[in-house]
């Protein structure tokens, strides 16, 4: 099933973790998914990208977030654009990290396994 969302923080894609990251509103996402990391497919401007989707608590605040990590997307997105994404298999549950270095290492590892196994498909 494909989901449609507007960016929560439109403009440049944030790369604070070293990966292009899209921040989306959590909304009712929790009704059909549990916290953790999932593989995902994303459609932006009629182009398809593979990546990872994290739904769970933010490290420093505990606030629930929905973030898409796209290792092969390096463009800006306009604030009025809609993002389409499809959640694939769950990779793992949320983990507790002591620092950002541990998070970056885990995301790097997760993305390698996710991207290798995906074949992108149209809406």
Image (spheres, grey):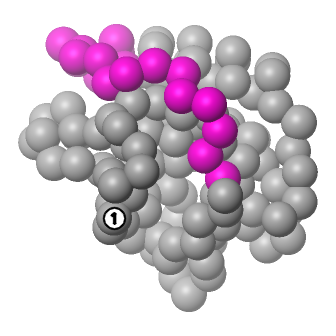
SS for dot 1: loop
Tell me the quadrant of the picture where the N terminus can be found.
bottom right
Residue 3: name its quadrant: bottom right
Residue drawn at (50%, 56%), measured in percent from left and top?
22
The answer to which of 64 and 97 lies nearer the viewer is: 64
In the displayed structure image, the side of residue 117 where residue 68 appears, left or right: left
Q: Does residue 21 lie above or below 96 as drawn?
A: below
Q: Does residue 33 lie above or below 26 as drawn?
A: above
Residue drawn at (61%, 46%), measured in percent from left and top?
87
The answer to which of 15 and 41 lies nearer the viewer is: 41
Residue 90 covered by magenta stretch: yes
Decide if residue 74 is in sight here.
no
Q: How far across and how far down the image is residue 63, in percent?
A: 16, 48
Residue 28: name its quadrant: bottom left
Task: Find the magenta span and give its range.
Answer: 86-103
Q: How far across and how far down the image is residue 68, in percent?
A: 53, 47
Q: Decide: few, some or many residues near mark 1? Use Cα within 10 Å; few <14, some 14-19, many ≥20.
A: few
In the displayed structure image, the side of residue 3 where residue 113 appears, left or right: right
The answer to which of 107 and 42 lies nearer the viewer is: 42
Decide if residue 45 is in sight here.
yes
Q: Residue furthest left?
A: 61
Residue drawn at (43%, 39%), measured in percent from left and top?
54
Residue 96: name its quadrant: top left
Q: Does residue 44 lie above or below 96 as drawn?
A: below
Q: Does residue 91 lie above or below 82 as drawn?
A: above
Residue drawn at (87%, 45%), measured in percent from left and top?
120
Residue 108 covered by magenta stretch: no
Tell me the quadrant of the picture where the C terminus can be found.
bottom right
In the displayed structure image, the side of residue 114 where residue 64 appears, left or right: left
Which residue position is annotated with label 1? 28
The answer to which of 96 and 15 lies nearer the viewer is: 96
In the displayed structure image, the side of residue 44 where residue 13 appears, left or right: left
């Amino acid at each position: 099933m494909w989901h449609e969302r507007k960016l929560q923080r439109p403009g440049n894609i944030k790369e604070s973790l070293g990966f292009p990251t899209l921040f989306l509103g959590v909304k009712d996402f929790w009704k059909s998914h549990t916290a953790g990391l999932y593989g995902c497919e994303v459609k932006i401007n009629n182009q398809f990208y593979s990546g990872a989707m994290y739904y769970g608590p933010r490290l420093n605040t505990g606030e629930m977030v929905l973030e898409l990590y796209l290792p092969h997307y390096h463009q800006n997105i306009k604030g009025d654009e809609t993002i389409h994404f499809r959640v694939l298999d769950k990779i793992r549950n949320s983990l507790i990290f002591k620092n950002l270095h541990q998070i970056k290492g885990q995301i790097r590892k997760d993305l390698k396994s996710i991207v290798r196994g995906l074949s992108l498909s149209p809406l």
